[in-house]
Amino acid sequence: MTVTESEQLAYVAAKAADARVNVELETDDGMTLNIGPQHPATHGTLRIVAKLDGEQVLWVEPIMGYMHRGYEKLVEVRTYPQITTLVNRIDWLAQTCNETPFILATEQLMGVEAPLRAQYLRTIFHEMGRIAHLTMFLGDMGVQIGALTPMFYAMRDREFVLNQTESVSGGRFHPNFNRIGGLKDDIPKGWLDETIRIMRKMEAFCDQMEELLLGNEIFEQRTRGIGIIPAEIAQQYGLTGANLRASGVDWDLRRDVDSPMAWKHADFNVVTHTDGDCYARTWIRLQETREACKIVTQLCEDLPAGPIMAKVPRIIKVPAGEAYVATENPLGEMGYYVVSQGDLGPFRVKIRTASFHNISIVPWVLRGVYVPDIISILGSLYFILGDIDR
Amino acid sequence: MMLGLELAYWQESILRSLGVLAAVLLPAGTFVYVFLFKMVSFMQNRLGPMEAGPYGSMQLLAEVGKALQKEDVVPDAADRTLFKMAPYLVVATVLLTYVVVPFGPDMVFIDNQVFGTGIFYVMAVSSISVIGIILAGWASASKYSLLGALRAAGQLIAYELPLVLSVVGVVIQAGTLDLQRIIVAQATGEIFGWGAIGNPFILTQFIGLLIFMIAMQAELAQTPFDMPVAESEVVGGYHVEYTGLRFLLFFIGEFATAGAFSAIAATLFLGGWWLPGLDLDANYMNVVGPLVLLAKMMVFGGIIFFIRFTYPRLREDQLQRFAWKFLIPLALVNITATGILKVVF
């Protein structure tokens, strides 16, 4: 029997693969533990290679790219109105929050501004996306620490918010409701009262979570003083959102940047915490859910009458130019750098997602912790795989 | 003689073996259905199984059937013999534990005159299961299994001690190691001369019961002490590589052990198969006794699973600190106090 060249190659490749596996199993200078790509704590397919000494971490390296879907390339072959459908899938829990910065960047390039009513409604949807997202976080944080029950309460109450989004747009997770220059439709009758009522429910949910999860002694033991990130380090690694505010940096794009959204008409606090540990990050997100409920309630009460669509041509051509617009999304700063050459679609879009930067601090913050702490730190940094890999 | 019948030795042996099997499987099945399927579902705002049988009561059979159909996978790198042996070792431990638990005045699997060590035997045998767990973890040739098994070993060693020490108080009070005589001591005891409800040791050994419950939670690897199987960390720990029947055996082992420890706790602290107002020596107690014991076991099982689905998980070092720095000193204080009071009164 003759051996073909491809068989020989396959044999060599198999030997090489075996050798690599054996290197991983060596325990001379610690044990290499592959956390992921298939691991319940990685919310998808993040891989974390950890070198362990017993249960203590010597070094870790996050490996991303298992879910790369090539959005930045895909949007180059789409027209502007088609892109919102696509980018909706980046941070799949955040509903319209993915669309907002892209729409704002395009409008900035075109020199269009949405009417005031559309701005209010966009902000309401943006904040409802935040509530749905952070509700999920609070449940998920419990699961990571080992408490299964809060997850079910979070699922139950998030449903109210999702139903509200669905009743307007028809979509629960990917509403695709923003249009360049405004919104697709106006809201249905009675929607505002129902939303205000649901915001009260969500505030009650926050109270419940504060007692059930954050008030639990074991939860505090597992999160207080674990994974401390000082403010300077957080800024060096480009952390944004709640992770940065938990380190004591008072920085929020909703308040600090003047964008054509309705945040400036609402009265809300930017919550910060000085500890920078897992507990602080969880606590910040809980308070942010409360603040978001406040914003939605205020905006629903003050919603002005008027059109929901500015005057835009039927076929959207964006004049040549560049624009970068970022908004404060549930995970942190999400920005779109749109380069247009005057065509129906963009020439190049760079998407700046929060999770990519938030996860980059992992090698720094995970040194020397124990294996269970890896899970609570990853859980509290809070990332969405689609948001890392795009 | 057994239950008033003249039986040959081999007939008795078969009856006893079947009895132990029933004693292991019935409470385990009841625990899984009532607590794991239903109580937890209602805690978590859902219905739980509803399709198989009335209120999903046949779901357990469906699950067992599913597990039996699955392929029995042994990983390539695994140590085949040890890997296959481990689950049987875990289940055998539970069977051995039930052997000394009395279910009625005559409903005992082993004669007390022959085998009077009772609770001492339980404590010794119950720690065999950790060998099965270490075998499973090591033989799987998976790092997650290994981490889980080593955590389980450390945890079981740390919590065996408070478990034994918490029982010592009961033994001092009853003056015997034999479980049957511990029940009699509780039934015939008096509280300051008032003997209407006997003297269940939950009243005098309340601290002992608390320590026993906490140590039991850790022995069973239930939340907040479930690091050996923590699914968000080590993805199931020592049983991560098991499928089908062998996984089912681990599963049965977990819940049957919960049943066994509940039975021991009920016997030690709540008076076992005896209830106030029932005749201690009557023949009907052989029928009523098992039901009374099962009801008392359900109380403890309910507490175990209620805690399991309420609390988050501790870290391994925090658990060790809790055992060595808090539970064991408390158990020693309890023993001293019990001894002094026993001498004084």
Image (spheres, rainbow, N blue to C red):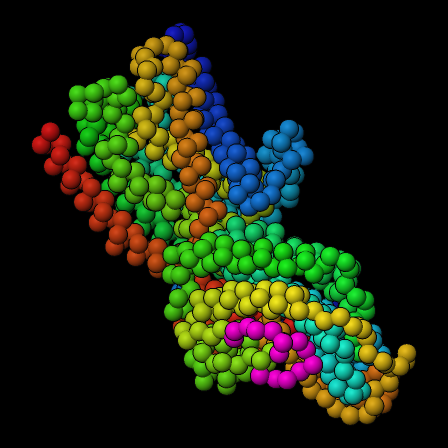
Q: Residue A83 is drawn in which quadrant?
A: bottom right
Q: Residue at (42%, 64%) from the top-left corner?
A: A223
Q: Residue at (56%, 62%) from the top-left corner?
A: A137
Query: In what quadrant of the picture does the N terminus of chain A appear?
Result: bottom right
Q: Nearer the viewer, residue A157 or A29?
A: A157
Query: Does the rendering let one see residue A217?
Result: yes
Q: Give the range drawn in magenta.
A: A256-270
Left/right placement of residue A187 relative to residue A359 reads right
| Residue A2 drawn at (x, y percent) | 77, 67
Magenta stretch: helix, strand or loop mostly:
loop
Query: In what quadrant of the picture does the C terminus of chain A appear?
Result: bottom right
Left/right placement of residue A296 relative to residue B291 reads right
Is residue B269 shown above or below A293? above
Q: Which of B148 and A221 is in front in this view?
A: A221
Q: Nearer the viewer, residue A258 or B107?
A: A258
Q: Residue A173 is drawn in which quadrant?
A: bottom right
